[in-house]
Amino acid sequence: MTDLEAALRRAVRGEVGFDVTSRALTTMDASNYRRVPLGVVAPRDADDVAAVLDVCRERGVPVVARGGGTSIAGQATGTGVVLDFTRHMDRLVGIDPEARTAVVQPGLVLDRLQDAAAPHGLRFGPDPSTHSRCTLGGMIGNNSCGSHSVAWGTTADSVRELTVLTARGRRLRLGQEWAGAPDGLRGLVDGDLARLRTGFPDLPRRISGYALDALLPENGADVARSFCGSEGTLGVLTEAVVGLVESPRARALAVLGYADEAGAAEAAAGLLPLGPLTVEGMAVDLVPSTEGLPRGGAWLFVETGGDTEAEARARAEAVVRAADVVDALVVTDPAGQRTLWRIREDASGTATRMPDGSEAWPGWEDCAVPPARLGGYLRDFRRLLTAHGLRGTPYGHFGDGCIHVRIDFDLLTDAGVARFRRFSEELADVVVAHGGSLSGEHGDGQARAELLPRMYGEETVALFERAKAVWDPDDLLNPGMLVRPAPLDTNLRFSVLPREPVDVEFGYPADGGDFSAAVRRCVGVAKCRTTSVSGAGVMCPSFRATGDEAHSTRGRARLLHEMLAGEVVTDGWRSTEVRDALDLCLSCKGCRSDCPVEVDMATYKAEFLHHHYEGRRRPAAHYAMGWLPVWLRWAARTRTAPVLNALASLRPLAAVAKRLGGIAGERDVPRLAGETFSGWWRGRRRAAAGDGDLVVLWPDTFTEHLSPSVGRAAVRVLEAAGLRVALPPTLRGRAVVGDGTSRSALSLLAARRGRVCCGLTYVSTGQLDRARAVMRRTLDLMAPVLETPAPVVVLEPSCAAALRTDLPELLHDDPRAARLAERVLTFAEVLERHAPGWSPPAVNRPAVGQTHCHQHAVLGDAADRRLRASAGLTGDLTGGCCGLAGNFGFEDGHYEVSAACAEDQLLPAVREAPDGAVVLADGFSCRTQLEQLAGVRGRHLAEVLAEELERERRR
């Protein structure tokens, strides 16, 4: 233990982390930059903060305050001690509805303040797109804005008083009329009044530099306001009094379509006199799908408010009339507005990939110009991009003249980094020529501070340095930011990654087969750190259960990044730190769809486990549950299911078996079916062959051995819809598609018996060599099917997802894998596509449950929703993950997190279900979780429909 670490442990009551994981998690924010800290402290209160400052001051160690870590200019990274306010100093101290103020701690997430203010008809005005995870302290440090700044301004406009600690331990309460000013600050201002009155651009989004002009007497000598945007370089915030605004009772959203981006930009300023709440802009190259948007190549999102829906709509329609548009849409439905806003909010992530899949990065993320000059600035910006051979997709706050853009800089080579510098310098000159600010929202950090002399001139920047010296004479707080900055092309986070592709098992087709590029996908916007999900969202259940950054998608990606870098995490694939962080990843695949840049942590986990345990003994659970298809087939062949069920019911024997198998003691072992699904299939009386399409029903391991009732129900429904059902061949060779067997003598002589399997259990436990062998055997068996047009119907969503994604990505060298993946359909999809004229029976009951996480992430549930609606099953299923997630919830040590995930969405929805509701759960894991934690029987949609068909037959 170092002297610094020991001193901090003695001095503070909060957590002190100098371990590999704590440091690796905080090397980066959402910027291009990386700095390795000495350690991390999570202070419990202001006294802890003061103690950290005392210890670090004595030793000359820098201190960096960090909130949600979503800063885009590098200011939330540091080489000394990082203060993490999100663990303890995250309280809403109080709200005063009469005064319209709130008292907050720096680690409070913005959405928690909004939720508390909403019952009073109030809200905090600024709302960055990261509102679900950014903190008030970070917003004050960066002077954040958000989409509603045209109505409610920047964070500085909402700050009333700030309580801060200086690096030398003084506790100050900052406010107007010089309240809380450190010694020497007033003299500095009085000595340079002319410069402060003339040297700062007058525009709504001037965030760059220190806001020293707020200290002018005509501006109220507002010390609190001048502190905003100082990026943790002047003092450490411990509490804030912020103002709230009245939230409109009703809102409408006018989406205005324009021919191109320049047209939308030039129109934005003209809409401001109409008093909109937002004027946001984005172009077509940032939108994955234009479905639901009006015609055009670019759009303005203009929100209006009112006391009633009619009033809000009238104002939105007035905006449409005043705008010269190609097309327009006015939406008053809150759900419809949320869907449209989600397109805009996800832009910070989707913009990190160009349309062709190549990478794009921040650096010139948020410069701002006077709104009336935005159109001209964008044209000059585009010309400069072309001159440097770069591409970028601007979007953002057009009403404030502030744009965001990610640019396809090459930050991996010396030549690319040199071009990054040249472009940055030239663009700074373009911004200044248009009367703009280098930063319009996210601050200067390391990305732009070096260029501040181009905007302000050397003398004003020298004034900034003098102000920093007044507040922090020892340069202890976040050095290298804003004044005396590090060069903008140093400390780049990509420089430490390997230059040659890493030898991996999966194909990573979206990343050119490069595992480093896959890990680079995480840019740190931290959508995975949200504490609640909306709609059908899933990501990230383990973070919501633990609240620990290490168990978020971003945290795991950071650890993998450091594993590849080899500086902090030094054991490579053998790293126990990476293994432990991945241990609580449920492999729910939620990040694959919910992360704006489609990080696929389930695949990365499987890849890591494969290498981590290569040539080594694995955990018992990997053998017990990874090889589950083998054990279940063995039980079926030996007809020992009744005996095994009886033994499992004896608690002492079950406890021993679970301990040997690495299974959580709190879990009950699921009962094996007395008759397998394929056994039932072979012995059933065949229905009269219909004349509909042939479909091949996949007998997945769970349906085959644990819940054959689902398979039987699916056959009943598919045949009722007129489809001809077959099972996959079980003989390799000259097998035929039909009844799942081949009885010809030639086939029996030339073929070997086998069973199809998607390989899911081997993939999820990282046994990729075994998974590959199983998948190749499956492709051999499925060869006759692939010669027909028959779709492959998979009832278990996790198996369908494995066939759609894991199969072609793991067997990327086998063209048959892609062909099989293309054939895979869900139960609802096959009915919709191959029996379009069939109408399901009328169940006419409410439905509750949860969309399977793999279905949400990989397969989609649109067809399921339509099928449920046709059957009269009303209500929406919840999002999230059930928490059992295949082997995860059964593994020893995972029970508490598994149960917490179930309590997040699924179990509350079931408890609150109306009388007579059908509990839907298409996944075996979901049904098992419901049964074991709530004593509720969930059913596959096929079972519900088959039961209703039988009821109709009996009538």
Image (cartoon, helix red, strand yellow):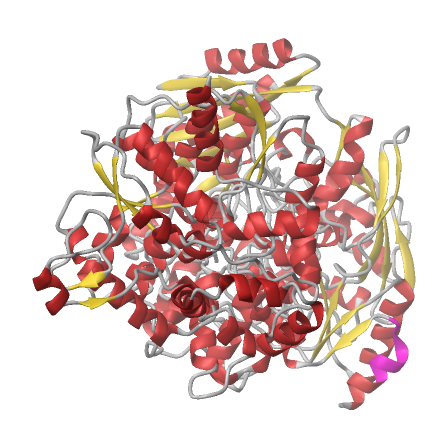
The residue under the point 68% across, 40% down is: 154
Tell whether position 11 is magenta.
yes
Q: Quadrant of the N terminus?
A: bottom right
Where residue 49 sits in the image (x, y, percent)?
Answer: 85, 67
Where residue 149 sits in the image (x, y, percent)?
Answer: 63, 35
548 relative to 517 in the view: left or right = right
The residue under the point 38% across, 57% down is: 802
Q: Is residue 779 above or below residue 904?
A: below
394 relative to 199 in the view: left or right = left
Q: Quadrant of residue 481?
A: bottom right
Q: Is residue 87 above or below residue 624?
A: above
Tell whether position 128 is magenta.
no
Q: What residue range appears in magenta?
A: 7-13
Q: Foreground residue, 866 or 871? A: 871
Q: Foreground residue, 772 or 522? A: 772
The residue under the point 46% across, 50% down is: 854
44 relative to 127 in the view: left or right = right
Where residue 738 sits in the image (x, y, percent)?
Answer: 19, 47
Q: Foreground residue, 302 or 799? A: 799
| Prevailing secondary structure of the magenta residues | helix
Q: Is residue 269 above or below residue 774?
A: above
Q: Is residue 773 visible?
A: yes
Q: Foreground residue, 254 or 60? A: 254
Q: Quadrant of residue 637?
A: bottom left
The residue under the point 50% across, 86% down is: 617
